[in-house]
């Protein structure tokens, strides 16, 4: 039983060490890019939202003008 626990402990320790290395590399890559990883995505979504609001406003204005004529 002790041998199985020791093997499981060694496997877990190795996996944790690999995860720590991956996290450190990811942090270094994020720092080197100079911006948050999803910054471009946020701006793209804001631009799309603004565009949809402008388009929606244009449609509503035309529908309102048409209802006034009738």
Image: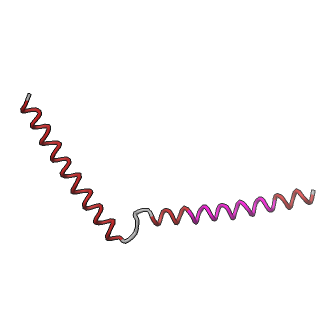
- Residue 12 location in percent, x, y? 17, 42
Secondary structure mainly formed by the magenta segment:
helix
Q: Is residue 7 magenta?
A: no
Q: What stretch is highlighted in magenta?
A: 46-62
Q: Which residue is drawn at 45% across and 65% down?
A: 39
Q: Give the residue at the far top of this rendering.
A: 1
Q: Is residue 66 left or right of residue 49?
A: right
Give the camera-side residue of 70 and 1. Answer: 1
Up the image or down, 5 lies above or below 58; here it is: above
Q: Residue at x 10, y 37 (%)?
A: 7
Give the camera-side residue of 51 and 34. Answer: 34
Up the image or down, 20 lies above or below 51; here it is: above
- Residue 62 location in percent, x, y? 81, 62
Q: Which residue is drawn at 84% across and 59% down?
A: 64
Q: Which residue is drawn at 75% across and 63% down?
A: 58
- Residue 30 location in percent, x, y? 33, 65
Q: Give the residue at the far right of this rendering.
A: 70
Q: Give the residue at the far left of this rendering.
A: 3
Q: Does the magenta stretch include residue 59?
A: yes
Count of marks, rendered view? 0
> What colouring does the structure picture have?
secondary structure
- Residue 49 location in percent, x, y? 61, 61
Q: In this view, does 50 lie to the left or right of 2?
A: right
Up the image or down, 13 lies above or below 69; here it is: above
Name the quadrant of the C terminus.
Answer: bottom right
């Amino acid at each position: 039983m002790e041998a199985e626990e020791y093997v499981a402990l060694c496997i877990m320790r190795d996996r944790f060490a690999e995860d720590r290395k991956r996290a450190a590399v990811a942090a270094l890559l994020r720092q080197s890019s100079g911006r948050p990883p999803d910054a471009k995505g946020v701006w793209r979504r804001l631009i799309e939202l603004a565009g949809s609001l402008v388009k929606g406003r244009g449609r509503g204005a035309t529908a309102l003008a048409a209802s006034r004529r009738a």
